[in-house]
């Protein structure tokens, strides 16, 4: 018999007790925990915004010719370069506490 999926989880992000939806993907949290719909959406939106910022910052560090080339690259290529830049320490993340509360 297949292991029954828990129907209700506590969001590890905001602490909301929520019901899992039909295509919920397990978020690799502790037993009984998951990430609620709204937090999954918020996290994804924030990642896109962070990546937009990183792409713009990277463009600003290039000369004019390279900036044009850089901005013409497909998004997935830009993202790969950005990830590599973070790995190599060319770019750094600033960890700071957000002033906004998620809920
Ligand atoms: Zn949540």
Image (cartoon, rainbow, N blue to C red):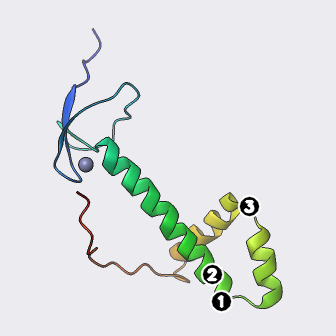
Q: Is residue 15 left or right of residue 70?
A: left
Marks 1,3: beta carbons within 8 A: no
| Quadrant position of residue 7 | top left
**Do the numbered discs 2 and 1 sit on residues whose CB atoms are within 8 Å?**
yes
Q: Gap in Å between the C-alphas at discs 3 and 2?
A: 15 Å
Residue most extreme to the top:
1
Q: Secondary structure at mark 2?
A: helix
Q: In terms of sequence position, does the residue under pointer 1 or pointer 3 come before the other? A: 1
Residue at x 24%, y 53% (from the top left corner)? 13
Q: Is residue 14 left or right of residue 75?
A: left
Q: Position of residue 18 (x, y in %)?
A: 21, 36
Q: Which residue is mark 2?
A: 58
| Residue at disc 2, CB closer than 8 Å to ligand 1 | no
Q: Quadrant of residue 31?
A: top left
Q: Residues within 10 Å of mark 1 (few under 14, many from 20)?
A: few
**Residue 58 in which image quadrant:** bottom right
Residue 88, above or below 72: below
* The one of 16 and 84 positioned closer to us in this rendering: 16
Distance from label 1 to label 3 (Cα)? 19 Å
Establish if 87 lies above or below 33: below
Residue name at image x 40 percent, y 49 percent? 41
Give the structural element (helix, strand or loop) at label 3: loop
Q: Which residue is mark 3?
A: 74
**Percent position of residue 57, x then y:** 59, 82
- For mark 1, give the secondary structure: loop
Residue under numbered circle 1 = 61
Mark carried by residue 14:
none
Which residue is painted at 75% across and 75% down in the image? 70
The picture places residue 8, in percent across and down from the top left corner, at 19, 30
């Amino acid at each position: 018999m297949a292991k029954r999926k828990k129907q209700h989880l506590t969001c590890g992000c905001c602490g909301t007790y929520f019901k899992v939806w039909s295509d919920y993907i397990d978020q690799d949290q502790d037993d009984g925990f998951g990430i609620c719909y709204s937090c999954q959406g918020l996290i994804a939106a924030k990642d896109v915004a962070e990546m937009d910022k990183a792409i713009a910052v990277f463009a600003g560090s290039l000369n004019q010719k390279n900036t044009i080339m850089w901005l013409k690259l497909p998004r997935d290529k830009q993202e790969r370069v950005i990830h590599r830049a973070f790995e190599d320490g060319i770019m750094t993340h600033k960890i700071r506490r957000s002033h906004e509360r998620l809920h």
